[in-house]
Amino acid sequence: MTCLLDTHCFIWMTADPDRLSHKVRRLVTNPANILLFSAASGWELALLWKLGRVRLPDDPSRFIPETLQRLTIQALPISLDLAITAATLPLHHRDPFDRLLAATALREDLPVLSCDPLLDAYGVRRMWE
């Protein structure tokens, strides 16, 4: 199964795996699954770090790529088309990073590993419980 990680899921995988649901823990530890990390989540995590809202063991420019490689998570770019799609989605979710995740999930037909119920309004397949 191929899954898109929400930013908090990635953070918890690395810093506090007990915060992941049992189902998500099984999914992210199964080597048969392909995990994707959106550039939007990288951007969000670096911004949260810069604002002092998230602590990382290293600068995000090193921490994120090294962690993706170590955990065998594939980075997913943001295309112009995807950015426009995210901007034109209904305003169920005001967070632009989450709107990019919803647009990615819908466009690529991917489930999102996220505890954020606001994503449900977009009709994405959200996996958590």
Image: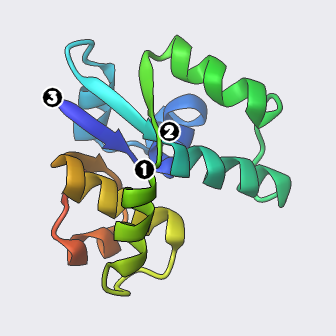
Residue 119, image x and y in percent? 30, 69
Residue 109, image x and y in percent? 15, 49
Q: Which residue is drawn at the image coordinates 76% and 31% (left, top)?
A: 61
Q: Secondary structure at mark 1?
A: loop
- Tag count in the figure? 3
Which one is in front, 91 or 50?
91
Residue 1's disc is 3
For badge 1, the amino acid type reads: Asp
Residue placed under numbered mark 2 in the picture: 10
Which one is in front, 120 or 89?
89
How dense is the environment of label 2, judged by Cα within 10 Å: few (below 14), some, or many (20 and up)? many
Q: Secondary structure at mark 2?
A: helix
Residue placed under numbered mark 1 in the picture: 6
Q: Quadrant of residue 101?
A: bottom left
Give the mark, 2 or 3, whose residue is nearer the N terminus: 3
Q: Is residue 129 visible?
A: no
Residue 31 position (above or below residue 116): above
